[in-house]
Image (cartoon, coloured by chain):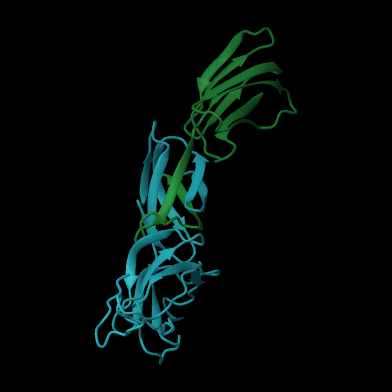
Chain colours: A green, B cyan
């Protein structure tokens, strides 16, 4: 049964490379590999219940996955940012020293 | 590329973001969003606060006269600051010129809801009174003039008599009062 594991951040929807460990129902490691840079790894396994562990820069997720004909093509592993510290941005008027901008937003785009 | 939107309220916003080099765009009503500085941020481990600035390009003129109209007698030397709603001052003091004009450059204007511009008067020419409370305006266009009234102060009478001869007025002389 072929399916994909996708590793990404549920808040930013940013994909990332992760390491995938797959254990069978006897807790034996049966597969280990890395996702690509888009967070995707294609796996082909016989029908069974597996415990899948994915680690990424955002942390670690373990969850049981039943591999059978009902399994969706992609199994998502949604990481959160809990392990990442919040970054604070202070926006002031460049001509009036320390005058805070009352309301607005900044957009940050990862420069890859 | 992943996009992170950081809402800014009262000059501050926070978000969980991983290390990396980011391009920065701003969306602030009334300001020139292309003036955001810096335009790239390198977010690194150990630094969790980043300072950015943005500027506007409107010009606000406060025209100060004795009657608050554009044909009143201009008051030279009246002083103003930009401030917030609480009266906290920002930037340099601006003083009216001989035409009674105090000019604030780089103020926000336009947008769906133009930002409120607060200012406060801190002085006049000594013979006119002024409102020292926080005042406000908004600008739909890049330039605007607000009329400010500084009415003439009340006439005060000073009597000077000889200290050793009760009620004996002094003939001619002059008093100088320094604030």
Task: Looking at the picture, tell me which residue is in the foreground, B51 or B21.
Answer: B51
Vertical position of residue B44 compared to residue B157: above or below: above
Asked which quadrant contains residue A5, the reply is top right
Image coordinates of residue B123 in percent, x first then y, are 37, 71
Instruction: Work out which residue is located at the far right of the displayed protein and give it.
Output: A70
Give the answer, above or below, for where B9 lies relative to A50: below
Residue B23 placement (x, y as % from top left): 40, 48
Q: Is residue A112 visible?
A: no
In this rendering, is residue B122 above or below B24? Answer: below
Task: Point out the residue furthest to the front here.
Answer: B165
Quadrant of the drawing holding the N terminus of chain A: top right
Give the number of callouts.
Answer: 0
Question: B145 or B149, which lies in front?
Answer: B149
Q: Quadrant of the C terminus of chain A?
A: top left
Q: Quadrant of residue A61?
A: top right
**Foreground residue, B151 or A8?**
B151
Residue B22 picture location, percent across and down: 40, 44
Please provide percent x and percent y for residue A74. Answer: 64, 32
Q: Is residue B8 visible?
A: yes
Residue at left offset 51%, top offset 41%: B15
Frontmost residue, B41 versus B114? B114
Query: Residue at image x 42%, y 76%?
Result: B142
Residue plotted at (35% across, 51% down)? B38
Q: Residue furthest left?
A: B173
């Amino acid at each position: 049964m072929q399916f994909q594991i996708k590793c990404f951040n549920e808040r930013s929807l940013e994909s990332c490379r992760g390491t995938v460990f797959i254990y069978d129902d006897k807790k034996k490691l049966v597969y280990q590999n890395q996702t690509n840079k888009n967070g995707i790894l294609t796996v082909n396994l016989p029908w069974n219940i597996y415990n899948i562990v994915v680690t990424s820069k955002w942390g670690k997720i373990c969850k049981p996955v039943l591999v059978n004909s009902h399994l969706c093509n992609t199994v998502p592993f949604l990481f959160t940012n809990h392990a990442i510290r919040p970054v604070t941005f202070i926006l002031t008027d460049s001509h009036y020293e320390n005058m805070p901008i009352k309301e607005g937003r900044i957009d940050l785009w990862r420069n890859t | 590329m992943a996009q992170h939107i950081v809402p800014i309220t009262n000059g501050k916003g926070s978000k969980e973001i991983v290390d990396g080099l980011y391009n920065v765009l701003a969306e602030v009503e009334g300001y020139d969003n292309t003036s955001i500085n810096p335009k790239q941020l390198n977010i690194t481990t150990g630094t969790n606060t980043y300072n950015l600035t943005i500027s506007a390009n409107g010009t606000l003129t406060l025209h100060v006269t004795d009657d608050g109209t554009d044909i009143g007698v201009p008051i030279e030397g009246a002083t103003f600051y930009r401030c917030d709603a609480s009266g906290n001052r920002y930037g340099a003091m601006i003083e009216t010129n001989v035409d009674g004009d105090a000019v604030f450059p780089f103020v926000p204007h336009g947008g769906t809801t133009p930002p409120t511009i607060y200012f406060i008067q801190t002085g006049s020419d000594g013979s006119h009174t002024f409102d020292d409370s926080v005042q406000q305006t908004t600008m739909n266009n890049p330039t605007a003039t607000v009329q400010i009234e500084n009415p003439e102060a009340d006439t005060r009478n000073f009597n000077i008599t000889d200290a050793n001869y009760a009620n004996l007025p002094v003939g001619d002389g002059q008093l100088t009062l320094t604030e």
